[in-house]
Image (cartoon, rainbow, N blue to C red):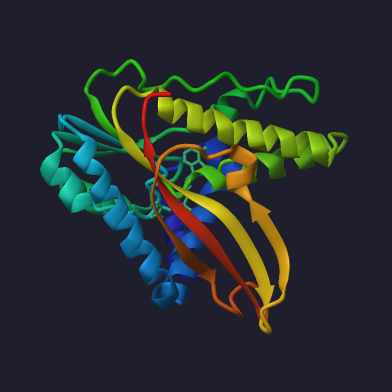
Amino acid sequence: MLNEWLTYLAADCPPLARKLGYLRESIGIRSRYRRCKTAWQPHLENSLSALLESLHACSNFRTALIFGSGLLLDIPLTELASRFENVLLVDLAHLPEVRGVARRHANVRCLSHDVTGFLERLKTITPGNLDLPPPTYFLDDPTVDWVASVNLISQLPLLPLGWLRERFPEIDEATLEEWSTRLMRQHLNYLAAFPAPGCMLADMEQTTYVQNGDVTEHADFAEKLGFERHTLSRWRWDIAPPGEIAPGIGRYHRVAALAVKRG
Ligand SMILES: C[S@@+](CC[C@H](N)C(=O)[O-])C[C@H]1O[C@@H](n2cnc3c(N)ncnc32)[C@H](O)[C@@H]1O
């Protein structure tokens, strides 16, 4: 508990992002990882391999841009730092240990940035106009030679939805559902707008089950987003083995590595 509190004080996370819960979530992921290390290992290894594999599409190695760098669990940072001139780690929360790892490489930088633009619109957003402008940050940087979005896309709407529900209880769930699909689609389009090749690690499905195997909840992101991009590989991530969420309840994701190309 004391460790979590010290992390909370020392982490790099903009005040508004802290208020919405990004730092709390990040500390929560760290605790879950510590509890579920063994179950997560195959997913983390698959993620590292897929990202490294996608580098074959690169012909230049100036800037590597990584969205959703988080705790760096699924990112081959040492290899990236040795191959690229610069590595930019983009997230809304950088825990002290992540900044420590980044500091060991002269060419790695952590950047606090909201890839959706939601936080920037927070003060002006209304139930009648929930639209966010399409993200453009970094698109004009000609040195970006590889872009990665790392187990991020399905997370993008979660905290914004929580804020919207609390701030505007009058917005119906169907509208919020449609808004969250648009938000994820904008991220896909954003990645595709980079002239550089890259890789998106994305949840295709999320399944919650009870111990006898019966499915209690199922979300199909692939169907919702119409992932038509090239699939490099697929695997199962046992994100919450039975007992992690609640007694007798487990959850797994189907994850895919998708090649990012100009749309
Ligand atoms: C499931 S984690 C990804 C795993 C991460 N690569 C790792 O190894 O810890 C999702 C990450 O996306 C970040 N994130 C969520 N929404 C974001 C946003 N709008 N802009 C930037 N980062 C965001 C979270 O802070 C979190 O670190």
In the picture provided, is 160 more to the left or to the right than 114?
Answer: right
Tell me where residue 11 appears, x and y as whole percent. Answer: 41, 49
Q: Residue at x 42, y 44 (%)?
A: 68
Q: Quadrant of the C terminus?
A: top left
Q: Residue at x 11, y 45 (%)?
A: 82
**Quarter occupied by residue 212:** bottom right
Tell me where residue 179 appears, x and y as whole percent. Answer: 70, 32
Q: Is residue 47 above or below residue 168?
A: below
Tell me where residue 7 appears, x and y as whole percent. Answer: 42, 58
In the picture provided, is 153 more to the left or to the right than 96?
Answer: right
In the picture provided, is 22 more to the left or to the right than 42?
Answer: right
Please tell me which residue lies in front, 163 or 223.
Answer: 223
Extreme residue toward the right, this view: 170
**Quarter occupied by residue 44:** bottom left
Q: Is residue 2 above or below residue 61?
A: below
Tell me where residue 143 appears, x and y as whole percent. Answer: 22, 22
Extreme residue toward the top, this view: 140
* Number of numbered discs: 0
Q: Residue at x 15, y 33 (%)?
A: 61
Q: Is residue 40 above or below residue 86?
A: below
Please tell me which residue lies in front, 173 or 16.
Answer: 173
Determine if residue 97 is in view. Answer: no
Determine if residue 59 is in view. Answer: yes
